[in-house]
Image (cartoon, helix red, strand yellow):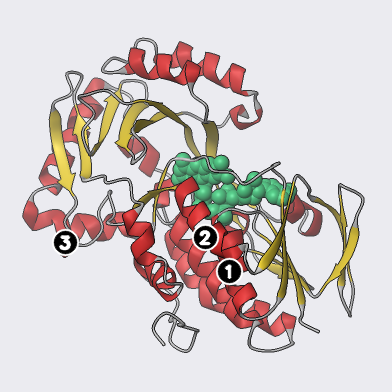
Amino acid sequence: MPRRILITGASVAGNTAAWWLGRHGFDVTVVERAPGFRDGGQNVDVRGVGREVLRRMGLEQAALARGTGEQGTAWVDGRGRAVAAFTMDASLGDGPTAEMEILRGDLARLLYEPARERATYRFGDRVIRIDDGAEAATVTFASGASERYDAVLVAEGVGSTTRELVFPGEADPRWMDLAIAYFTIPRTADDDRMWRWFNAPGGRGISLRPDQHGTTRAMLTLRQPPGGEQDWGADRQKAYLRQRFSDAGWQAARVLSGMEATADFYFDVLRQVRMRRWSSGRVAVTGDAAWCATPLAGIGTTLAVTGAYVLAAELARGDNVAAAFAAYERAMRPMVEDGQGVPKIAPKLMNPNSRLGISLLHRVLRIASRPGLRRLASKLSTGRAKEPDLTGYPDPAGA
Ligand SMILES: Cc1cc2nc3c(=O)[nH]c(=O)nc-3n(C[C@H](O)[C@H](O)[C@H](O)COP(=O)(O)OP(=O)(O)OC[C@H]3O[C@@H](n4cnc5c(N)ncnc54)[C@H](O)[C@@H]3O)c2cc1C
C-alpha cells in the first residue's frame, strides 16, 4: 500500500509538494480552504536554488515563458521621472527584479496542473482536528469526513489555522511595521515594462508593475505599526487606503480608482513566522506557514518551492517520518534563518517619512545603481547564501 499523505493548502508550497510526492508514488490528497483553485496574486520571483528545483521538475522554461516581462526597477519622482534605475541584467545576477518574475497565480497554476494528475484535490474544506498516533494521524475535516494519513504537511501560508491546532502559540510573529495592498488595475499606454516605485511622505509608497495579461499590478505600501488591519473586511481596508493615499501624488488618483473596481484585492500586514520546530509527530509545516520571511526578504517563493521539494525527497527516502522531518529541517533551517535576517529597519529605510528622507534614499539608490556597485547591490537584495545542497536529491529532468 502506498503511504498516504495529506497536504493542506494548494498554493506554491502545497502544489510543489504534491507534484513530487505524487511522482515518488505516494497516495496524495490536497485540501484547500478556497472553493476552487486560487489564481490571484501579484508579482513574485524565484531565484537560485528555487529555480534549480523548477528545472528538475522540467518547469523552468515554462515559468520563464509565463513571466511578467518586467525589465527592471525604477524609483520615480512625482512627475514620473526615474531618479534611480536597476535594469535586469542576468550577467550581474538577480537584483530587485529577478530574471524569473512571475505572477503568484501563474506560478501556482503551473505547478497545480501537472500535480493534480498525481494527487487528489479537495476544495472548500479544511482540517478541524488532528489526532496524532503511533500508526497514523487521524484527521477530521470541517465537512465531517475523517481519514487516516501517514503524514500531514501544512502549507497554508502565513495565517495557517491548522498550524495553530498542532503548534498552538508556537508561530511567534515578528511584525515588520509595513502593510501592503496588492491589486490589478487597467493598463494605460504609458505603463512601461519597469517596476516603478514612488515614495510619498508619511512612509507611503505606490508601485506599478507590468504583467503579461494586458493589465498593471499596483501596490500600496504603508509603513506603520501593526493595527490588525489584515483582519478587516476588504471594504474597510479600501476606505482606509483611500483616506491615506488621496493626497500622495504621482498616480494615486488612478490607482485608487482602479482599486474600487479590481477583482483581486489582497491586503497583508507583514509579519515573519518564526518557529523553533517545524514538525510534531506526523505533522510538518512548510512554506510561509513554517517560516514566512515576508516580501521584504524577496525569497518567500524560492523558499516555498525549495522547502516542499526537500520535504518530499526526505519522505521518499524511507518509512521513518520523524527522520524525514528532522532531515528536512536540518537542510532548510540555515537558508530560512538567513532569509529572515531582514533588519527591522529595512521598511523604514525604503519608506521614509519626510521629503528629506526620500531625497536621501533616492541619492543612495542612484549611487547603488551605478554599474560598479550593481553586483554588490544584487547580492544584498537577494540573501541567497546558505542554500541547501541538492546533490543526491532527485533530478528527473536532468536524468
Ligand atoms: C491569493 C494569494 C495572493 C498572494 N499575493 C501575493 C503577492 O501579490 N505578492 C507576494 O509577494 N506574495 C503573495 N502571496 C504570498 C505568496 O504566495 C507566498 O509568500 C509564497 O509564495 C509562499 O507560498 P505558500 O504556498 O507557502 O503560501 P500561500 O501562497 O500563502 O498559500 C497558502 C494556501 O493555503 C490555503 N489555505 C489557507 N488556510 C487554509 C486552511 N486552513 N486549509 C486549507 N487551505 C488553506 C490558501 O487559500 C492558499 O491557497 C499571495 C498568496 C495568496 C494565497
Q: Identify the element where label 2 is drawn.
A: helix
* Numbered disc in front, either 1 or 3: 1
Query: In front here: 340 or 37?
Result: 37
* Disc 2 to disc 3: CB gap under 8 Å: no
Q: Residue beneath label 3, please?
A: 92
Q: Tally the numbered discs.
A: 3
* Numbered disc in front, either 2 or 3: 2
Q: Is residue 365 left or right of residue 341?
A: left
* Disc 2 to disc 1: CB gap under 8 Å: yes
Image point (52%, 27%), residue name: 263
Which three-letter amino acid code belongs to the residue tagged 3?
Leu
- Quarter of the rendering occupied by the N terminus: bottom right
Q: CA distance from mark 1 to mark 3?
A: 32 Å
x, y percent for residue 22: 64, 73
Q: Give me the disc on residue 111.
A: 2
Q: Residue beneath label 1, please?
A: 19
The answer, for residue 160, to whether it is visible in the render is: no
Q: CA distance from mark 2 to mark 1?
A: 7 Å
Number of other residues with Cα within 10 Å of mark 1, as a class: few under 14, some 14 to 19, many 20 or more: many
Sequence-earlier tag: 2 or 1: 1
Which three-letter amino acid code belongs to the residue tagged 1?
Trp
